[in-house]
């Protein structure tokens, strides 16, 4: 599997570290609402199909990437810098929608 | 000034090794620059940082990922978004940059002791490196002067193409000895000279 | 002259004779022979024994699909089992032995299994061997007795215990077009792609390029196919943009057009070239792939089809044309299609007698009739082989009239003497790689085969792979596929090359099995018969996967290359459905078995790199015993002659507490945290405040995970307003870095902070003990180190022996202590200067054992206590949880489960029987050696404390503090250590910290 | 249906093996059942079996999307053990182990449970202490465990690199002798046959396409074979939990589906008579009765439902194998495959009522579900029949996350790929 890092270009999956569901939005740090926090820390979207994910190019430029990848085919349809387009800063996309 | 001790010392064996009867495929050496400095700009400040690199080293970096250049004394390349590795044959580069790079532009991190710089040169350099890295080393994909960040298993490596058949590799110092042994092992097949 | 070698022909070098042994007997062959061709040329017919029935087996094929002729190749004491003799190139001194037989290949006692035939049919083991419900053999015991015997009988070759001295290597490659297979289609594709300027890799699993051109006997535009192929190979060699890989099997098609291949670099050599690997594991990232992998000829399923001497027709042809070997003198042909007629013609031309051709079809084309006539064979259309004769070698066949509709017709069978029966049951395209890439094959009624779709995401097919069996069409398809793969526009395809002899009709009759009495094998190696397939049906194991799993069909080392389709066909008939409705198998990597060593590649013998501190060599030179801490190597003790480990660390710790000691702490994770928002960032990631830390001071910090449990700890030093040096534990350095980077990049991108790993930039030496300050004062210049200049947690810059150093006064040992950081390249220099300065004060270097001892005495926590399940309060670090600010973990740390009573809390233990305590021992209220129970917790770390003169330990115990002063017991049934302990505070030694504050 | 025995084998052999009956009926769905179990894998089948056997609930259908046992019960590396650190896990898996010890007899189907031991290796003194902690925890719950010295290990496992100069020398190991391996497919088939004999309908090629609701309550399913109503709907589809729960409108779960690869070598004569795990990586290996070395390692480490993995893990696993057994470098890997694991947030499973009324959920088995098959079905059946958790599975309910009562045997926190 290859992921095309926006900085480094296409690289083997072995250079990347998976950081999971990119749809999660960290609650307001001042909030202590247990349900919100519980959902953030423990619950994950886990779709069969297009999935918004965060990967870190740990073995390269170390940037975190917002990746749209199909969990049925492993096909990567979009890769962007997370810090610029970080999924946590916006709501959840409709499943199947391309970034 | 106290000289830096090479981490390769006990395993650095100058001379010809491996299958060199039909010729030397690659030459391996340690570069030991005086300074290795990491420069990193805040978002939007990258151009200013590049201008500073230019004013200090006279190296002109093109726009775009991994762009780099080198002179007799300096080498510089981008290895991550808005991040650059700059080397100098002399010591003291970090201090120079610390004066030149205000905190509004970015940060300066001295890695002169933290990274070990190795050079592989020769007709078989691409072949030997391809044993260790999943990187396309052909000059079309990896042009002269440019740099990349990658890994060989646990060993994070930054690589700059320093010549048509020459690459400079920067590895964490603690891994340098293991990496050197691996590099020599990979070069056995083509015959190599350590210089 | 070997008995079966033809007087001329073949691609072997008859001037070069190679000597080798098989089962101890010496044989000779020629350069270019495989072990199979060389043994056949010597008249050998018995190659191996089957898996279950131990039936004698010969060689069935000439290639990678060989199910029967498996051998073990010996190189000294190193064993390479289960290699098809058809894939072993002979070399001078080759030693091969047969397998799965005792005492010998010819006389194998386990052949008695055949008598149990019907009893040990498919799946029999599920129905028996369960044994009695009561008594000494109840439970699993009876089965395990039986299993021992079954295991010994099963298995093929034997693996050795002697380490393989071979070298294996990896190669990463990138190309525009990877062509798999170098037959006419592949060569044509490679040429076209190369001409367009694309970067091309051509991979061929055989030792010679050309594929079927090597044995087809055809001419292409008037030129022998072999010459045509070598011309193109020569042309390709002249291209800079082409890499030719022979002996290279592409075995895996992974995501992103990443393909894996194994190149057998040294297997055909007696001794490898210096520095050359035995196998090279290629990872090829190709923009596009041309699959020109050809097709496999399928056996027919009939009684006795496994007798040595039965061979695939194409294989026989290949032995004759490529190796100059005749598989028999008197040959009978048995086929359901035309291709066997070419084989008959070839074998006849090479000198064999074709006794008869039994064709299952009633109607046979005029072309075939002519070929039969020309080779002098009796043509028996509408006939089938219903049995074979002979013991360990074919002596004759029995033929009967046959109709496709009714099967074997009643009437007298006819016996024909023969020493070889060549068989063709049609062809199955080699679609494995396409299937791995996700392609769904489509059944083709004409060809009675599964064909790949036209193209896939990233690949194009050509030739036999597509079910295109005429060489002319294969060349044209290769041309087109090569162009497409290279991204060239399609062009009008020119005229087809002129091939002689003309192609025969590739369509077989839809017959897979001839039903008659006797064992008819579908999967040769695993002894799966047609009756086994029907039994599976009877018992409801109808889906392809159930069929495979229940009968083991297709699970042998040949991976069902020949048996897959016949097995399906027999099941389809039993179910009464068309073949495609029964399904097909999805192929997975590897296409053919791959050596484990090749995949380990450069990591074979070197699993992980060594991570060494700058002072590593000094430690070794000064008697340190090292051990692994993750990838790092760290001194455990600096033992003196005759000392035990305990004596050594007690001496080291004691000396440190009495005078001074020095320890290498370079492995601590160090992260430069820089930028205008660095302090704010640290406030968010640590439980305590860092924005209030003045420049030139350090502070101990604690990090939680988001779930509120403790993650890591360490000191962070403020070197400038915007410049912090964070230290982490050695073990967690990488994880902490990743954790911080995640938050910066994903959660708080607005913070201007840069993180850089500077672990390797700094050599760290911690020097502690009552004399530590004096030692420093003796060697540090440029700064004072007294209490005023360097108070507790203060930081100063200075020099030692000319090298710049950064000194922080902090203590892990509980003594007056300092961490001295220098550039790594100066590490040994500074360390030696410190050692020299310390000598007059009696300072010793100490290792991890003494370090651990002193930290246990002080009750400091490490990874043993921060085990991912403990909270800050469990570790009595609740005081570090700031109430002034939110931080990572603050929202989750008070959940009911994390504040419940009865959690394991950190305590100290003192051994009351003056015997050592062990890490991992449990704590109980009352000892019960026979039936240990009631664990209250466990010991995390233990030592002999020189400061207390007692064996002590840290432990996590339910109830914790409430048990201080109470008695309990260690219960360590694993090491048979039981005894009384007193539960005390984890601050064993100098709880007020007088010593370190000085 | 006839009992399986040596005698029945002989009788059938004499009649040409023509009288065998299907191991289970090919049932068609009825309009309604007391319980519908979604998932014809090990856990679904054992659940149905124990519903019938322990609770007398026989009006049960097991719905399987593909062929029976096509999920992880047929894709795992067959290890059965109860060597856990935390008491909740140890108790549950030990109960399972006891059921395994009698399973072939219970099912009248030889599942070939072979108690040849599972040995965890330690490569530093610290690791050995960690193993001792685990082993002692087991012993304090009455479970067998022993420490082995390097010398003992060397004798038990010839071919293992025992040299002190090895990159990660072996300091010792923790052995559970009662652990071992079983024939994975046989477990599915045995439970299917057993459930079928008690009247359960096993319906293959029946894919659930949605849930029937009465208000909030789940009252059945829709499938490619029509509507099937049920008083209770049980979901036991580890590996597909995300997909099936999404059909019920539950799109967030404390689970990531990740792919785990496994490998088998070509058949070898007996080489390894135990199951071995490496302490410096995730590698584990056993040998099947057919002679193949069955082995695997780490997860690929990303979400996937594709049942296929990638090369880096292949290479990692092989590297670890030859690091332990340098003589196996010339031996060849024959097959590889991928299974999709429900990786939960604490590495422990979920057996629970809900999360919707009328629904029961069994999932989150990470890569350890096979060994749990008997106890999982046993406890899940109890949960379904009694609408309350069994004492053994009570700690494994869904609300443990919000309560902070996670069961984190590896101490890795909510990062599923690290469990």
Image (cartoon, coloured by chain):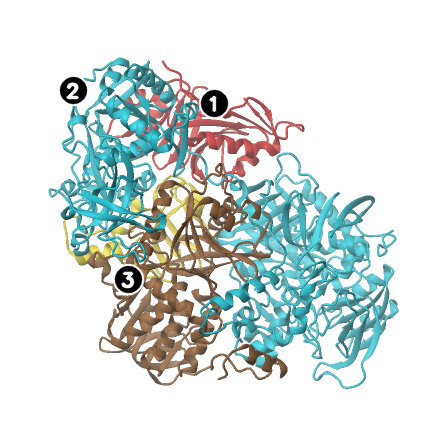
Chain colours: A yellow, B red, C cyan, D brown
From the viewer's perspective, is C591 left or right of D133? right
Other-residue count near label 2 (Cα within 10 Å), few / some / many at <14 / 14–19 / ≥20: few
Chain at numbered mark 2: C
Mark 3 falls on what kind of element? Answer: strand
- Camera-nearest label, 1 or 3: 1
Measured in 3D between alpha carbons, the distance from the residue under mark 1 to the one under mark 3, in whole angstroms, is 55 Å
Chain at numbered mark 1: B
**Dot 3 corresponds to which residue?**
D252
Residue sitting at 28 percent across and 72 percent down?
A: D383
Q: Label for residue D250?
A: none
**Dot 2 corresponds to which residue?**
C787
Chain at numbered mark 3: D
From the viewer's perspective, is C185 left or right of D361? right
- Camera-nearest label, 1 or 2: 2
Measured in 3D between alpha carbons, the distance from the residue under mark 1 to the one under mark 2, in whole angstroms, is 39 Å
Is residue C326 visible to us here?
yes
Is residue C220 visible to us here?
no
- Camera-nearest label, 2 or 3: 2
């Amino acid at each position: 599997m290859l992921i095309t890092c926006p900085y480094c270009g296409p690289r083997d999956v072995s250079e990347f570290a998976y950081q999971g569901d990119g749809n999660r939005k960290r609650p307001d740090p001042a909030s202590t609402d247990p349900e919100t926090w519980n959902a953030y820390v423990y619950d994950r979207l886990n779709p069969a199909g297009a999935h918004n994910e965060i990967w870190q190019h740990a073995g390269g430029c170390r940037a975190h990437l917002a990746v749209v990848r199909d969990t049925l085919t492993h096909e990567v349809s979009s890769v962007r810098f997370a810090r610029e387009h970080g999924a946590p800063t916006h709501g959840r996309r409709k499943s199947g929608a391309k970034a | 000034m106290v000289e830096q001790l090479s981490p390769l010392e006990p395993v650095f064996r100058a001379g010809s090794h491996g299958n060199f009867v039909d010729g030397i495929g690659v030459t391996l050496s340690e570069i030991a620059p005086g300074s290795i400095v990491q420069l990193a700009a805040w978002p939007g400040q990258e151009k200013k940082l590049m201008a500073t690199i230019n004013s200090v080293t006279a190296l002109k970096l093109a726009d775009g990922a991994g762009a780099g250049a080198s002179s007799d004394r300096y080498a510089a390349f981008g290895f991550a978004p808005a991040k650059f590795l700059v080397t100098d044959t002399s010591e003291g580069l970090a201090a120079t940059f610390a004066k030149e790079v205000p905190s509004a532009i970015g940060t300066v991190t001295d890695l002169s002791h933290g990274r070990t710089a190795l050079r592989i040169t020769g007709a078989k350099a691409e072949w030997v490196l391809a044993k260790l890295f999943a990187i396309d080393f052909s000059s079309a994909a990896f042009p002269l002067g440019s740099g990349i960040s990658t890994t060989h298993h646990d060993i994070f490596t930054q690589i700059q193409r320093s010549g048509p058949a020459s690459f400079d590799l920067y590895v964490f110092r603690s891994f340098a000895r293991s990496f050197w042994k691996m590099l020599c092992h990979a070069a056995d097949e083509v015959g190599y000279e350590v210089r | 002259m070997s008995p079966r070698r033809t007087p001329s022909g073949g691609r072997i070098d008859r001037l070069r004779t190679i000597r080798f042994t098989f089962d101890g007997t010496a044989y000779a062959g020629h350069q270019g022979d495989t072990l199979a061709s060389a043994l056949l040329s010597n008249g050998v017919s018995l190659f191996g024994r089957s898996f279950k029935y131990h039936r004698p087996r010969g060689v069935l094929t000439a290639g990678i699909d060989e199910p029967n002729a498996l051998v073990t190749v010996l190189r000294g004491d190193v064993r390479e089992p289960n290699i098809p003799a058809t894939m072993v190139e002979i070399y001078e001194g080759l030693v091969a032995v047969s397998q799965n037989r005792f005492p010998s290949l010819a006389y194998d006692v386990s052949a008695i299994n055949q008598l149990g035939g019907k009893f040990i049919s498919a799946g029999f083991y599920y129905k028996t061997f369960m044994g009695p419900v009561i008594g000494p053999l109840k439970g699993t015991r009876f089965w395990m007795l039986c299993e021992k015997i079954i295991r010994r009988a099963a298995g093929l070759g034997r693996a050795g215990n002697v380490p393989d001295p071979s070298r294996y290597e990896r190669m990463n490659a990138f190309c525009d077009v990877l062509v798999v297979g170098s037959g006419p289609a592949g060569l044509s594709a490679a040429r076209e792609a190369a001409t367009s300027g694309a970067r091309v890799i051509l991979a061929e699993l055989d030792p010679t390029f050309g594929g079927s051109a090597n044995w087809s006997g055809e001419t292409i535009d008037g030129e022998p196919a072999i010459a045509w192929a070598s011309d193109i190979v020569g042309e390709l060699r002249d291209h800079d943009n082409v890499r030719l890989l022979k002996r290279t099997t592409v075995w895996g098609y992974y995501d992103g057009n990443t393909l894996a291949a194994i190149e057998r670099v040294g297997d055909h050599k007696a001794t490898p070239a210096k520095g050359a690997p035995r196998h090279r594991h290629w990872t090829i990232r190709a923009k596009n792939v041309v699959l020109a992998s050809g097709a496999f000829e399928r056996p027919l399923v009939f009684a006795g089809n496994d007798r040595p001497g039965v061979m695939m027709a194409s294989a026989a042809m290949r032995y004759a044309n490529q190796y100059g070997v005749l598989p028999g003198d008197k040959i009978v042909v048995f086929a359901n299609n035309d291709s066997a007629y070419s084989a008959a013609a070839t074998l006849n031309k090479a000198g064999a007698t074709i006794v008869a051709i039994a064709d299952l079809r009633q109607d046979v084309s005029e072309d075939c009739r002519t070929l039969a006539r020309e080779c002098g064979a009796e043509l028996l259309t509408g006939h089938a082989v219903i049995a074979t004769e002979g013991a360990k070698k074919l002596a004759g066949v029995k033929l009967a009239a046959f109709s496709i509709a009714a099967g074997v017709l009643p009437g007298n069978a006819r016996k024909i003497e023969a020493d070889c029966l060549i068989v063709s049951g049609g062809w199955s395209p080699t679609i494995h790689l396409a299937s791995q890439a996700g392609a769904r094959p489509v059944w083709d009624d004409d060809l009675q085969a599964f064909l790949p779709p036209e193209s896939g995401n990233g690949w194009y097919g050509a030739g036999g792979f597509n079910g295109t069996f005429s060489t002319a069409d294969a060349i044209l398809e290769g041309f087109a596929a090569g162009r497409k793969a290279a991204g060239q526009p399609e062009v009008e395809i020119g005229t087809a090359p002129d091939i002689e002899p003309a192609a025969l009709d590739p369509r077989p009759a839809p017959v897979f099995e001839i039903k008659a009495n006797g064992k008819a094998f579908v999967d040769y190696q695993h002894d799966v018969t047609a009756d086994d397939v029907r039994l599976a049906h009877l018992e409801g194991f109808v889906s392809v996967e159930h069929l495979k799993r229940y009968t083991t069909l297709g699970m042998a080392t040949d991976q069902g290359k020949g048996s897959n389709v016949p097995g399906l066909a027999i099941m389809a008939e039993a179910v009464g459905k068309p073949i495609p409705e029964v399904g097909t198998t999805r192929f997975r990597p590897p296409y053919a078995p791959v050596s484990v060593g090749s995949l380990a590649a450069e990591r074979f013998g070197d699993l992980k790199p060594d991570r060494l501190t700058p002072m590593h060599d000094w430690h070794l030179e000064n008697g340190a015993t090292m051990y692994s801490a993750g990838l790092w190597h760290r001194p455990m003790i600096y033992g003196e002659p005759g000392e035990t480990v305990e004596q050594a660390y007690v001496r080291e710790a004691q000396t440190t507490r009495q005078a001074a000691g020095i320890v290498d702490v370079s492995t601590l994770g160090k992260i430069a945290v820089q930028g205008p928002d660095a302090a704010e960032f640290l406030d968010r990631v640590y439980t305590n405040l860092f924005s209030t830390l003045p420049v030139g001071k350090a502070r101990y910090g604690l990090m939680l995970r988001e779930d509120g449990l403790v993650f890591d700890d360490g000191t962070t030093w403020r070197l400038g307003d915007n410049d912090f040096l964070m230290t982490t534990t050695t073990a967690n350095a990488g994880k902490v870095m990743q954790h911080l980077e995640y938050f910066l990049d994903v959660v708080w991108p607005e913070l201007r902070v840069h993180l850089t790993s500077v672990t390797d930039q700094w050599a760290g030496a911690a020097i502690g003990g009552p004399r530590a300050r004096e030692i420093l004062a003796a060697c540090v210049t440029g700064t004072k180190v007294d209490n005023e200049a360097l108070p507790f947690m203060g930081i100063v810059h200075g020099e030692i022996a000319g090298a710049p150093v950064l000194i922080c006064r902090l203590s892990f040992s509980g003594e007056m202590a300092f961490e001295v950081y220098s550039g790594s390249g100066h590490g040994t220099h500074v360390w030696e200067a410190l050692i020299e300065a310390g000598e007059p004060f009696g300072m010793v270097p100490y290792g991890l054992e003494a370090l651990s001892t002193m930290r246990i005495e002080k009750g400091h926590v490490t990874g043993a206590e921060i085990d991912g399940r403990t909270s800050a309060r469990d570790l009595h670090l609740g005081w570090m949880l700031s109430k002034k600010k939110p931080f990572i973990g603050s929202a989750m740390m008070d959940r009911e489960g994390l504040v419940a009573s009865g959690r394991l809390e950190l305590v100290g233990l003192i051994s009351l029987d003056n015997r050592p305590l062990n890490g991992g021992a449990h704590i109980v209220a009352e000892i019960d050696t026979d039936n240990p129970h009631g664990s209250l917790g466990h010991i995390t770390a233990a030592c002999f404390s020189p400061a207390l003169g007692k064996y002590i330990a840290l432990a996590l115990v339910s109830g914790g503090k409430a048990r201080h002063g109470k008695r309990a017991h260690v219960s360590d049934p694993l090491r048979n250590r039981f005894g009384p302990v007193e539960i005390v505070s984890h601050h064993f030694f100098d709880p007020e910290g007088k010593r370190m504050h000085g | 249906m006839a009992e399986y025995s040596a005698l029945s084998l002989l009788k059938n052999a004499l009649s040409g093996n023509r009288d065998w009956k299907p191991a289970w009926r090919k049932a068609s769905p009825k309009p309604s059942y007391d319980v519908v179990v979604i998932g014809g894998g090990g856990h679904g089948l054992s659940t149905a079996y124990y519903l019938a056997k322990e609770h007398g609930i026989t009006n049960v259908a097991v719905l399987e999307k593909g062929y029976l046992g096509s999920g992880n019960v047929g894709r795992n590396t067959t290890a059965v053990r109860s060597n856990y650190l935390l008491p909740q896990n140890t108790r549950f898996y030990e109960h399972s182990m006891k059921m395994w010890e009698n399973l072939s007899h219970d099912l009248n189907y030889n599942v070939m449970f072979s108690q040849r031991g599972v040995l965890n290796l330690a490569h530093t003194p610290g690791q050995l202490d960690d193993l001792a902690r685990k082993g002692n925890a087991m012993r304090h719950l009455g479970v067998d465990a022993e420490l082995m010295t390097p010398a003992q290990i060397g004798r038990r496992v010839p071919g293992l690199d025992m040299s002190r100069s090895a990159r990660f020398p072996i300091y010792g190991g923790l052995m559970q002798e009662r652990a071992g391996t079983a024939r994975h497919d046989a477990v599915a088939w045995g439970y299917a046959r057993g459930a079928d004999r008690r009247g359960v309908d096993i319906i293959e090629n029946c894919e659930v396409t949605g849930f029937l609701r009465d208000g909030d309550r789940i009252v059945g399913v829709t499938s490619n074979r029509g509507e099937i109503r049920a008083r209770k709907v049980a979901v036991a589809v580890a590996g597909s939990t995300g997909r099936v729960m999404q059909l019920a409108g539950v799109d967030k779960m404390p689970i990531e589906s990740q792919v785990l690869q496994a490998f088998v070598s070509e058949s070898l004569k007996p080489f390894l008579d135990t199951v071995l795990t490496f302490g410096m990586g995730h590698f584990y290996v056993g040998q099947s009765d057919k002679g193949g070395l069955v082995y695997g390692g780490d997860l690929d480490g990303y979400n996937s439902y594709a049942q296929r993995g990638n090369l880096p893990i292949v290479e990692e696993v092989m590297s670890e194998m030859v690091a332990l057994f340098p003589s196996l470098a010339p031996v060849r890997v024959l097959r590889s495959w991928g299974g999709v694991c429900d990786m939960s947030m604490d590495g422990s499973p979920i057996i629970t009522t809900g999360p919707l009324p009328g629904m029961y959920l069994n999932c989150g088995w990470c890569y350890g579900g096979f060994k749990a098959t008997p106890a999982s079905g046993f406890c899940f059946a109890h949960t379904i029949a009694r609408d309350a958790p069994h004492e053994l599975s009570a700690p494994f309910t869904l609300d443990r996350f919000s309560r902070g009562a996670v069961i984190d045997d590896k101490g890795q926190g909510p990062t599923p790929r690290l469990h």
